[in-house]
Amino acid sequence: MKYAHVSGRAVTAAAMTTTVLLALSGCGEGGHSAGKVPALLEVAGVTVKKDAKLHETLPDAVKKSGTVRVATDVPYAPFEMFVTEGEKELTGLDYDLGQAIGARLGVKFAFTPQKFDGIVPAIQAGKFDVAMSAMTDNKERQAVVDFVDYSVSGTGIMVVKGNPKKITTLDDLCGKKVAVQAATNQFDLLKTHQKECEKAGGGEIDIQTFPKDSDAQLALRANKVIAQVLTEPAAGWTAKTADGGAAFEVVDDPAASGGYNASPNGIAVSKKLPELTGAIQKALQSLIDDGTATKIFEKYGVASIAVKEATRNAAVD
C-alpha cells in the first residue's frame, strides 16, 4: 500500500483523500502506557478473549511491560484515522485489528503517530516494536524488518450506485471516459491497459486525470465519467461512507481479488523480536479463523482485501 505510489500514495505519507471521515466505535488513544489489560475486549462488535498459550509465546520484555509499541502514520483512511481532527483518539482498520491482536495476546497494542518515512528507522532504533500503517511488504524492507501479512490490495474500480453501465472488468472501460488521480499507479494501469483495449477493438480508454481522488469523485457523481479507478481500500471506504453508502459501489472482479496488481500489506516487526513476529502471526490467524478479522474488514468496507492466511514475508516484488 504505502510504497512509492504502489497504490496511489507516495511514501511521504500525504493523506488519502476520502469523501467522508466518520468516527467509529472501537477507538482509543494513541500512545497508551502499560497497565492492566482487560480479559475481554470488544472490537467491531466482536468480543476478543485472551489466549493464555499465545501470551506465553511473547518475548519476556513484552510480557513484563504488557505493551507492544506500535508506529502508525495518521491519517490514511480507512487504515488509520483520527476520530476528531486535532485530537489524539484513533480509529481505523489497522487500529482495530491491532487492538484485537493485542487482546488475543493479552497485551496492549499502543499506537503512536509517526511520519511514514521514519517508521522503519524508528523500529531499527528500538523506539517501536512494530508498525501497523498499511505498509507494503516488499523485499527491500524485509532486509530490516519482518512482516506478518494481513491484507492484499491493489487497484479497484468504483462506479455510481447501481452500476448502470454494468462495468465488471477493466475491459469494460475501453472506449469510455474514466476518472483517475494523476501521477499514480492507477493512471499507469489504465495507460498500460490501452493495449488490451486495442486488441479487443473496444477503443482506447478516455482517461480523465484529476489532482485529487475527491475531484474524480465529483466527476463521477456528475456522470462526466462512467467510473473512477483508485486503490481498492479507498474505493471500498468511499463507497461505504459517501452519502451513507448511497452514492457509489465497487466493482467486484472475481479474477482480481483485492484489486488489480495487488500486493501484500503487513505488520512490520523488529527483527530483534522474532518471538513477537511468531506470536502476532498466530494471533492474527486465530482472528481470521474465528471470523473476527472479517468483521473488522467489513466495518471499513474493505472485505475484499482480507486474507485467509496470515503469511510471513510474502512480498511479490
Image: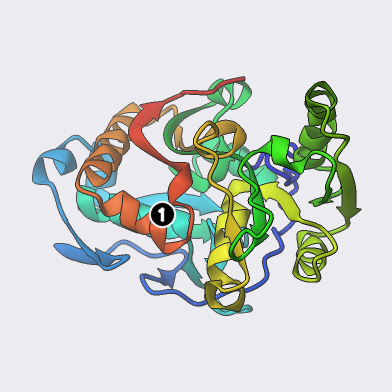
The residue that disc 1 covers is 297
Is residue 128 visible to the viewer in this orientation of the structure? Answer: no
- The answer to which image quadrant residue 283 occupies is top left
Residue shown at 62% from the left, 58% from the top = 163
Point out residue 161 in the picture as x, y percentages from the top left corner.
Answer: 60, 66
Color style of the picture: rainbow
User: In the picture shown, does residue 292 fall above or below 205?
Assistant: below
Point out residue 35 in the picture as x, y percentages from the top left corner.
Answer: 26, 65
Q: Viewer-proximal residue, 288 or 200?
A: 200
Residue shown at 44% from the left, 74% from the top = 24
- Quarter of the image with the C terminus is top right
Q: Residue furthest front?
A: 201
User: In the picture shown, does residue 240 fall above or below 118?
Assistant: below
Element at badge 1?
A: helix
The amino acid marked with disc number 1 is: Phe
Residue shown at 24% from the left, 67% from the top = 42
Point out residue 293 in the picture as x, y percentages from the top left corner.
Answer: 32, 50
Residue shown at 10% from the left, 46% from the top = 52
Q: Is residue 293 left or right of residue 314?
A: left
Q: Viewer-proximal residue, 21 or 176?
A: 176
Q: Is residue 292 left or right of residue 200?
A: left
- The answer to which image quadrant residue 245 occupies is bottom right
Q: Viewer-proximal residue, 194 or 74?
A: 194
Is residue 284 visible to the viewer in this orientation of the structure? Answer: yes
- The answer to which image quadrant residue 159 occupies is bottom right
User: In the picture shown, does residue 162 fall above or below 181?
Assistant: below
Q: Viewer-proximal residue, 23 or 107?
A: 23
Q: Is residue 209 left or right of residue 92?
A: right
- Quarter of the image with the N terminus is top right
Point out residue 41 in the picture as x, y percentages from the top left corner.
Answer: 22, 65
Q: Residues within 10 Å of mark 1 (few under 14, many from 20)?
A: many
User: In the picture shown, does residue 123 fall above or below 231?
Assistant: above
